[in-house]
Amino acid sequence: MTRQARLGLFAVSAAGFGTLLLWAVAGLPDFGHYHGVYGTTLNSVAVGERHATNVVAAVVFDYRGFDTLGEEFILFGSVIGVALLLRDVREEPHRPRDEMRSDAVRLVGLGFAGALLVLGLYVIAHGYLTPGGGFQGGVVIASAFALVYLAGAYRSYRRLTPFPAVDLAEGVGAGGYALIGVVSLLLGSAYLHNFGPLGTTGSLASAGSIPFLNVATAIEVSGAFVLIFTEFLEELAVTRVETGA
Amino acid sequence: MIPLQIAVILLVALGALATVLTRDIVRLALVSGFYALTLVVFFLVLQAPDVALSELVVGAIGFPMVIVVAIVRERGDE
Amino acid sequence: MSYLPYALAVWIFLVGLYGVVSSRNLVHLVVSLGVVQSSTYVLLLSIGYVDRGTAPIFKDVPEGTRAVDPVVQALTLTDIVVSVTVGALLLALSLQKQKRAGTTDPDQAGAMRG
């Protein structure tokens, strides 16, 4: 099908589909007049039941913890796909070279990498008290590693992120999440049900098993993102050697 | 609906249009980061700080890193 | 006027779809796919909004203050992080395609063979 025919077909079908969508959306309740039951119920009981002040984190890791398990395994599967696609084809061994960068970029970049790491750990640790959690903090930690690369120190970056360690981190995170649910089975309740001491609301030692699931998620997400970055950045190193740079 | 929400909604619509219409892929990396920023403001105005934090780290770090590598790889092979 | 956020979601969806259909570059195609995904986040969060409600975090506001729906926020935030990984997988595929075919134009690069 030629490009013109494709665009013409798209114009016609988008007009029809758009009309249908707008008609469907007009049947929703008005913006702001939320009619659902679950939201209001959760907002009133979650803090009392789980002693976690961030109700969204309580929903992600406790009330809908099974959905998060599914999402983690989507993450796991697609990172395996990236590794499979990009690792196989890299035949020639390459010698990694540092880039020539100005000292200012190097200094600022490496200085900020440490601060980013601490920020990431803070966001993870307080995930069930204030906005944050395993997902957000995991990506921040991965970006701390990426900043080491961007500051020009490719060899340091590769020493920090060897493939076996990153693979292990990702596997431990994903498997750890599934196994913590099994502990709940062994204690006699449903899979991924909250267990453990609930503690005082608002302190770090609270919310039962939510901190453990939080940490498992953070390990998995940071491992997955560091693996993706490393796979993609290796491609660049191979390119530089191929073009004789 | 307060005027702030209407203004942010218009910004998001413009950002989406700009992202799709940018053909030069080096500019696309930047414009997609700008679109992610407008989405962050939209999520904040809808009182969703967790979602805004997610979109911020992903749109500023995760996605641009991967796109820039794809761009460099594509240019290097030509 | 109260249906504006829902109309925004429909607009973003159609605009992103136009980007996918008319794209001349595989990287542009993946970014447009990301735009289509973001329309679902906009729709989900707009449904959960409560008028004059605050964020569902009760660290410094007393319990019982009117807050927006936390369930749709939970669904959206895991989705955002996972969608980047899927986008990375698609970009890895496009890198391999470009190595074999030498071009990134989806019209000219043929179908992939095993």
Image (cartoon, rainbow, N blue to C red):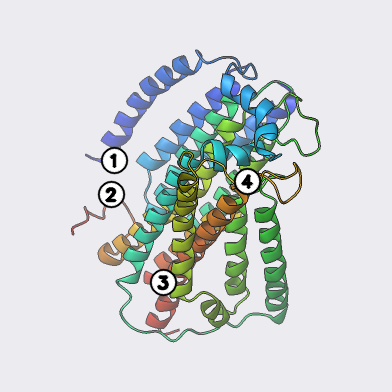
Q: Do the residues bearing badges 4 and 2 touch, measured as CB atoms within 8 Å? A: no
Disc 3 versus disc 2: nearer the observer: 3
For the residues labelled 4 and 2, the Cα–Cα distance comes to: 54 Å
Tell me what residue is drawn at x 35 percent, y 62 percent.
C95
Residue A34 horizontal/vertical position (percent): 61, 18
**Mark 1 in CB contact with mark 2 (< 8 angstroms):** yes
Local packing at callout 3 (Cα closer than 10 Å; few below 14, some 14-19, many 20+) is some
Query: Circle 2 sits on which residue?
Result: C107
Number of the front mark, 4 or 2: 4
Q: Nearer the viewer, mark 3 or mark 1?
A: 3
Figure check: A115 above or below A199: below
Amino acid carrying label 2: it is Asp
Q: Which residue type carries mark 1?
A: Arg
Q: Tell me what residue is drawn at x 53 percent, y 81 percent.
A: A159
Amino acid on which disc 4 is placed: Gly
* Structural distance between the alpha carbons of marks 3 and 2: 25 Å
Residue type of the residue flagged with mark 3 = Glu
Q: Quadrant of residue B45?
A: top right
Q: Nearer the viewer, residue A243 or C43?
A: C43
Which chain is mark 2 on?
C
Q: Residue at x 44, y 62 (%)?
A: A171
**Mark earlier in primary sequence (3, 4):** 4
Instruction: Indicate the secondary structure of the residue bearing disc 1.
Output: helix
User: In the rendered image of this protein, does residue B1 appear above or below residue A145?
Assistant: above
Q: Chain of mark 4?
A: A
- Spatial CA span between label 1 and label 2: 8 Å
Q: What residue is shown with label 3?
A: A235
Determine which residue is flagged by label 1: A3
- List the residue tagged with mark 4: A208
Disc 1 residue crowd, few under 14, some 14–19, many 20+, Cα 10 Å: few
Check disc 2 and report its element: helix, strand or loop.
loop
